[in-house]
Amino acid sequence: MLEAILSSIDEAIHAVDDKGITIFYNQVAAKHDGVEIDEVLGKHVLDVFPSLSKQTSTLLKVIETGKPIYQQSQTYKNSKGNLIDTVNTTLPIKVGNKIVGAIEIAKDFTKVKQLSQKLLELQEKVNGKQSKPVESTGAKYKWDDIITTSDGMKKVITLAKKAGNSSSPVMIFGETGTGKELLVQSIHHASSRKNGPFIAQNCSSLPESLLESILFGTKKGSFTGSVDRAGLFELAHGGTLFLDEIHTMPLDFQTKLLRVLEDGIIRRVGGTDSYTVDVRIIVAMNEHPTVLLEKNVLRKDLYYRLNVFFLELPPLRERKGDIDLLTNHFIQKYNYHFNKLVIGVEAQVLTTLNQHDWPGNVRELEHTIEFAMNMVDVEDVLTVGHLPSFIKREHQKEKITIRPLREIVEQTEKNMIEQALDIAKGNVLKASILLEVPRQTLQYKMKKYGFYKNTSIK
């Protein structure tokens, strides 16, 4: 009955014993592997799929490590030379604490990948040129994409979800790399404007001379080479406009922005016609607004107009509990991108990562793991050797500067006894009185540290 059930499931199922010999293989697996069931049953997985190895086979890796592998992409050739693309979930089979085999559930994406490639080729032929990236104006991140166990971060998400149910302006403060746009896109995606455009613009990247024309648009003939072009406010009509590092805008331009926020009316540069826009504004900054107000780089009236929902993202150094969680998330992400089979990290790696201060926050951690994943060859675990050099230098420095507490205590004791004996001119009783310890205790310590080799001590 169990065999009949497994054979009727519309997914490929492949089970092997602890030696890698196939003990179950259903018809779906045989179909997308391009082989017959009898060709696989009773044979070692590497004999049937010679393009795999002990390092690249998910089944053999799970038998070796005892750890499950979830949603791992795999590309291989079957015994007939056909290229197969699958996404596998591979689990160890245990009897008690002993691993007796592994089972793999695979989804075949070969046809989908082939059809996608053919579609791209047809588009290139129709267009007579190479395909170009597809323009996107939508938000792709949702609440589930924010990975955290931090209480502080969870409070921010709770408040952000309330902002998602509103159309009021939102102001976000967070250091570089804390995930401001991730939060902004989640707010947009949860709002009533989710089907409208989402446009993000970093204000520090806009030259002051172009700032007004990019945000408000231009009228043909207003200056040499100008054309009729909509600005970001018009393009974001019915949706959300995210302005990052808003404090880098000149103060006089902040006045124009305030006017748009008040009445929702814009006028293109060089034009006389006015346009009413319906845009939700979300702004962000990497310095606290109170500091920006003191520096006089953020207008008070603009601050008060925008500061309806204020969200402050904690830096990664204040949510250390998320480092292990995020590390495993990024490993899974780059397993998929780089077609690797890394299933974990050495304990020393996590210790090293937790000791780092992370001035670049989550973005810096992601790039660190991305680098490490590029350094992996056939290993299935990240080691300190895979980490970037600046992290390894910190690790070595930490190893050199930190001494065992026992050694420090003993050295301190030895120094104090030496000073007391010097003051007491070698008299043990007087030295014990100076140190406020019993004479017997001092004699024991002196014997331990070899002070009796000095014949002047009595």
Image: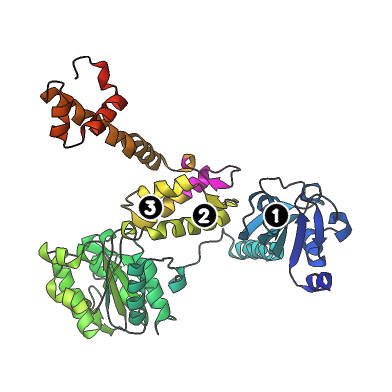
Which corner quadrant of the image does residue 317 belong to?
bottom left
Task: Measure the C-alpha gap from mark 3 to mark 2.
Answer: 14 Å
Is residue 39 positioned above or below 392 on the image?
Answer: below
Residue type, mark 1 in image:
Ile
Residue type, mark 2 in image:
Ile
Is residue 441 positioned above or below 130 on the image?
Answer: above
Asked whether residue 147 is drawn in magenta, I would say no
Mark 3, residue position: 364
- Mark closest to the chain's N terminus, 3 or 2: 2
Is residue 337 positioned above or below 111 on the image?
Answer: above
Nearest to viewer (mark 1 / mark 2):
1
Q: Nearer the viewer, residue 58 or 92?
A: 92
Nearest to viewer (mark 1 / mark 3):
1
Is residue 358 positioned above or below 11 on the image?
Answer: above
Residue 264 in the image: state x and y as whole percent: 25, 83
Residue 34 in the image: state x and y as whole percent: 81, 59
Mark 2, residue position: 331
Which corner quadrant of the image does residue 210 belong to?
bottom left
Of the 4 image quadrants, the one containing the C terminus is: top left
Q: Looking at the image, how many numbered discs can be counted on the residues?
A: 3
Q: Nearer the viewer, residue 68 or 196?
A: 68
What SS does tag 2 mark? Answer: helix
Query: Which segment is the magenta one?
Result: 370-384
For the point 50% across and 57% down, the residue is 328
Mark 1, residue position: 99
Residue type, mark 3 in image:
Glu
Q: Residues within 10 Å of mark 2 (few under 14, many from 20)?
A: many
Task: Measure the C-alpha gap from mark 1 to mark 3.
Answer: 38 Å
Check if mark 1's residue and mark 2's residue have beta carbons within 8 Å: no
What SS does tag 3 mark? Answer: helix
Q: Can the viewer see residue 387? A: yes
